[in-house]
Amino acid sequence: MIDYSADVQLAREGSTDAFARLYSTVYEDLYHIALYSLRNSHDAADAVSDTVMDAFCSIKKLRKPEKFRSWIMTILAAKIKRKQRSYFEPNDELNEDSPLSENFSFESVELREAVDRLDSESRLLLSMSVLGGYSSDEISALCGIKPSTVRSKLTRIKQRLRLELTPEL
């Protein structure tokens, strides 16, 4: 576990370098979770930018420096949900300009298509679990749902993907 205490304290005092060090520990996870949840590189970048700005402006409100990673992921989850609500209709089509095509190899086309068919909440939970490595308790705290609900939803999501990706005999 990373000790964020010193950099959080410096960031609270206005050190942009300390905040940059904190950001450098989470930026890849922030972007990957946003990208897989929103399926649009521009929206993902916007969500991450908004998250970082909010985190920088409200770092003084962070009560427990050791919880920096969870705290900033909570902000990101709220940004993702807000962005998803702003969509008028889902774009289920993938084209060759799709941002996901940058991160997937040709062999994983079936997986990408199966993940794209998931609803936005399922994509968020799956990306936080698989890409972010968060436990059901951490996801529960970040998303405001019960840990048992997170576990059961993840089980159903993974089972659905397994069924879709397993060839029939």
Image (cartoon, rainbow, N blue to C red):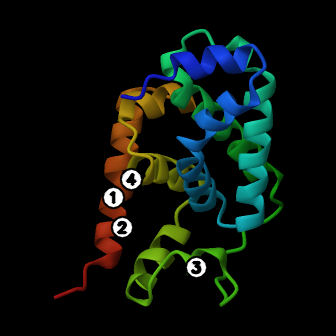
> Residue 40, position in %: x, y?
70, 67
156 lies left or right of 57:
left
Q: Which mark is residue 44?
A: none
Residues under numbered marks 1 and 4 in contact, where contact means CB atoms less than 8 Å apart: no
Task: Tell me the element at label 2.
Answer: helix
111 lies left or right of 29:
left
Give amino acid for label 1.
Lys
In the rendered image, the vertical position of residue 53 relative to residue 164, given as above or below = above
How far apart marks 1 and 4 lie (CA) works out to: 11 Å
Residues under numbered marks 1 and 2 in contact, where contact means CB atoms less than 8 Å apart: yes
How far apart marks 1 and 2 lie (CA) works out to: 5 Å
Which comes before the other along the chain, label 4 or label 3?
Answer: 3
- Quadrant position of the C terminus in the picture: bottom left
Taking the spot 44% from the left edge, 22% from the top edge, the residue there is 3
Which comes before the other along the chain, label 3 or label 1?
Answer: 3
Taking the spot 65% from the left edge, 75% from the top edge, the residue there is 99
Give amino acid for label 4.
Val
In the rendered image, the vertical position of residue 54 relative to residue 40, given as above or below = above
Query: Dot 1 corresponds to which residue?
Result: 158
> Residue 108, position in %: x, y?
40, 81
Of the two numbered discs 2 and 3 in the rendering, the one whose residue sits closer to the viewer:
3
Query: Dot 3 corresponds to which residue?
Result: 102
Task: Tell me the element at label 3.
Answer: helix
Query: Dot 2 corresponds to which residue?
Result: 161
Taking the spot 50% from the left edge, 25% from the top edge, the residue there is 141
Query: Dot 4 corresponds to which residue?
Result: 130
- Which of the pair 43/10 is nearer the observer? 10
How far apart marks 4 and 3 lie (CA) works out to: 18 Å
Residues under numbered marks 4 and 2 in contact, where contact means CB atoms less than 8 Å apart: no
